[in-house]
Image (spheres, rainbow, N blue to C red):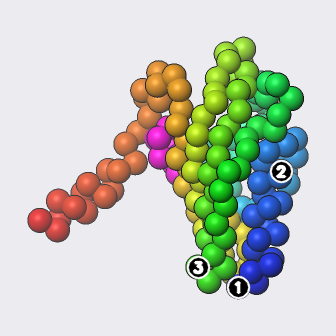
Amino acid sequence: MPSEVALEHTVADYIEVYQERKNFERLLSFYAPSAQLEDMIYGHFATDRNAIAKFYDWPNSKLTVLEGKPLFTVEQKVVDPLQNIAFFSGVFHRFSYFGEELGPWRFLIKLQFDKQGKIIHQQDWINYTPRSLITEGKNLNTPFLVDDKKGK
């Protein structure tokens, strides 16, 4: 199990690499091979590190952050080493994506870590606008809706 200091350091490093959006291999190194990523609003579920790489696809992305800012600013961060979990929230700054100007977007990201300090589960809650970006998203509540019906 990572120590409190080690987990804090890992989370800070992850945030810095994600904000800079330059070193894709380094970003992927934070994830365990079997890590999962749920983008709850967009409706995407990635089942392992390769699927996460395909979802992010930084090398082929045409994303440019505007106004010389990092990709996002963290406004609040909570790291709990007893549960190997971290939450951070903030704002994705304005950016251009394939020529379309988007943002700012508020967000909350939850990271669950294994005993080696690798991310095993990530859950994103990002307030995407315009809403047309997510009209084709899958409803990730489905497994829970099925379970709720069984309990009645």
Which percent across, then down, holds residue 109?
A: 60, 54
Q: Which residue lies furthest to the front in this view?
A: 75
Q: Name the residue under label 2.
A: 17
Real-space CA distance between mark 2 and mark 1, rounded to the nearest whole angstrom: 23 Å
Q: Which residues lie in the magenta part?
A: 38-47
Q: Is mark 3 on a helix, strand or loop?
A: loop
Q: Residue type at mark 3: give it.
A: Gln
Callout 1 secondary element: loop
Q: Which amino acid does label 1 sit on?
A: Met
Closer to us: 41 or 107: 107
Q: Residue at x 71, y 50 (%)?
A: 74
Q: In this view, does 132 lie above or below 104?
A: above
Image location (x, y in percent) of residue 143:
33, 56
Image side of residue 133 versus residue 100, left or right: left
User: Does label 2 or label 1 sit earlier along the sequence?
Assistant: 1
Give me the residue at 24% from left, 57% from top.
Answer: 146
Residues under numbered marks 2 and 1 in contact, where contact means CB atoms less than 8 Å apart: no
* Residue type marked 2: Val
* Quadrant into which the C terminus falls: bottom left
Q: Which of marks 2 and 3 is nearer the N terminus?
A: 2
Secondary structure beneath dot 2 equals: helix
Q: Mark 3 points at which residue?
A: 83
Crowd rating for badge 1 (residues with CA inside 10 Å; few <14, some 14–19, many 20+):
some
Q: Is residue 127 visible?
A: yes
Q: How many marks?
A: 3
